Image: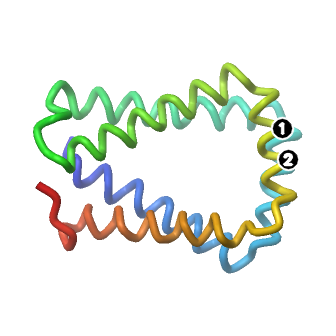
Amino acid sequence: MDAQLVLLIYGFILFIVALKFLVDPKSVAKVTKDIADHHGLLYMSGILPLIFGVIILVGLGPGLLVNHIRLLAGIIGLFLVVQGLFRLLFTESWAHCLKKYARHKHIHVKLGIMFIIGLLLMLIGFGFIPLR
């Protein structure tokens, strides 16, 4: 697995999700409320990042510290594993966080930051922003 591909895919996902919710910010409250109210969706929202994080970490193998791109991809994989574990082990806290997030007044700021991070990761993944 190539680390640039991991950055490209993760950046693309962040970019598209942020773009969707920037266009229709009212749907964020609906989606987060639906996820918080259904236990199956709460568990799936924990299992998926855990699986993807483990795939990234195992796919990159022991060479995480070879260069900055592999390190950044490894950090993303580790972040996904921690996120998945939190969502699985602390389901009630995760549901409370989702309900609080749905009521947030300045959601567009968080979505804008997510949009910018996604764009930067895609540019790194395509090689327009070189990391050594």
Q: Quadrant of residue 78?
A: top left
In percent of width and height, residue 103 lies at 87, 58
* Amino acid type of the residue tagged 2 in the rendering: Lys
- In the rendered image, the quadrant that contains the C terminus is bottom left
Asked where in the image residue 70 lies, by quadrant, the reply is top left
Specify the quadrant of the image occupied by residue 67: top left
The answer to which of 82 and 17 lies nearer the viewer is 82
In the depicted structure, whether residue 68 falls above or below residue 51: below
Q: Which numbered marker is on residue 131? A: none
Residue drawn at x 66%, y 75% is: 22
Label ID, residue 96: 1
Q: Is residue 122 above or below residue 44?
A: below
Q: Residue at x 47, y 70 (%)?
A: 116
- In the figure, is residue 42 to the left or right of 6? right
Distance from label 1 to label 2 (Cα)? 5 Å
Crowd around label 2: few <14 · some 14–19 · many ≥20 (10 Å): some
Image vertical order of residue 76 relative to residue 123, above or below: above
Determine the residue positioned at 68% across, 80% down: 23
Type of amino acid at the residue the image marks with label 1:
His
Q: Secondary structure at mark 2?
A: helix
Q: Which residue is mark 2?
A: 99
Q: Are marks 1 and 2 in contact (CB under 8 Å)?
A: yes
